[in-house]
Amino acid sequence: MLVAVDPVGPAQAQAPAVTSPVSVQVTARPLEAFDLRDRTRRRFGQLEYRSGLVLTSSFGPFGGLSAFRIDADGETFVAMSDKGDWFTGRLTYRGKTLTGLADVQSAPMLGIDGLPITSKKMFDTESLAVDGQTLYVGIERTHRILRFDFRNGGIAARGEEVAVPPAVRRLPFNKGLEGMVFVPKGLPLEGTLIALSERGLDAAGNLLAFLIGGPRPGQFTIRRSDGFDISDAALLPSGELLVLERKFSLLNGVGIRIRRLSLQEVAPGALVDGPSIFEADLGYEIDNMEGLDVHRTADGETVLTMISDDNFSMLQRTLLLQFTLVE
């Protein structure tokens, strides 16, 4: 059971939201290839490139997309920026190829008082987990988790704070909760919110992660290697945990990888590890990849979707990429 705690700041039950959802026009440019050096190549580790888009918009708050969740149909999505804004809409396709975004709406995340959470200095919203119509948002710099019931207004819903383990509050500044998944029924740890830190480390230098609610709450670690930090996570239908990681150096620039972990091995006190199924550097069409999700198509293909956070910089891009998992 995930327990709500007293909201941050005084409750104002009658306070109206300061803004309503607005429609957003997003322009999409296709990425025909993923490998900049070999445009005919389609296979990358255990992933096969399907398609990708470069997304732009004249809407000021568009950008900084730090998390992206897609419905089972592979079309309806909810995303958020690290400045506390929601984005919802549909992915459009031509066959298996992404063509754009449609029906996009945006609104600021609201606190229990109906005011934007940024009014309480609750920003750097980095992680997002979905349990039906209940959404959980991790706020990295303040080490908090908010719960939103989308049955009450969708992106106009008000968030309430969820109790977190004391160790979450002690995570490093700007290296806190970066990835979250909610484990559905039928999988090990069902009903658990799994929260992963970007670079909270134990004494052995491994990455701290937390089991919140569910049958076995507690703390575990993920083996850190090759200088990678966590940027998101997603669950495969088979019950395995995919962890999106990234690293940066002035010499080599940005690198990303995806590791595959067994959910069966995740437990309080456990140290878990798993193989890399995908790696890429700046020789490929990547940017600051921060969001990862999974859906299964009607013909049984498992599709991974990644999105990048452009940090609202003219030097970076918002990329939306899709790959097929090749078993």
Image: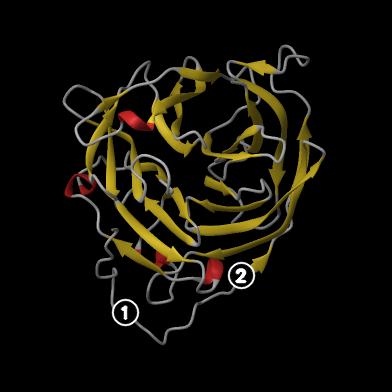
Quarter of the image with the C terminus is top right
* Foreground of the two, 25 or 33: 33
Relative horizontal placement of residue 147, taking residue 101 as reference (left or right): left
Residue 98: x percent and y percent? 76, 39
Residue 32 in view here? yes
* Foreground of the two, 266 or 226: 266
Q: Mark 1 to mark 2: distance in Å? A: 22 Å
* Foreground of the two, 312 or 14: 14
Quadrant of res 176: top left
Q: Which SS class for mark 2?
A: loop
Residue 123: x percent and y percent? 40, 56
Residue 64 in view here? no
Neighbor class of circle 2 (other Cα within 10 Å; few <14, some 14-19, many 20+) is: some
Instruction: Indicate the amino acid at tag 1.
Output: Ala
Residue 285: x percent and y percent? 66, 25
- Mark 1 and mark 2 residues within 8 Å of each other at the beta carbon: no
Quarter of the image with the N terminus is bottom left
Counting residues from the N terminus, which is met first, the one under dot 1 or under dot 2? 1
Tell me, for residue 11, which label it has, or none: 1
Neighbor class of circle 1 (other Cα within 10 Å; few <14, some 14-19, many 20+) is: few
Tell me, for residue 21, which label it has, or none: 2
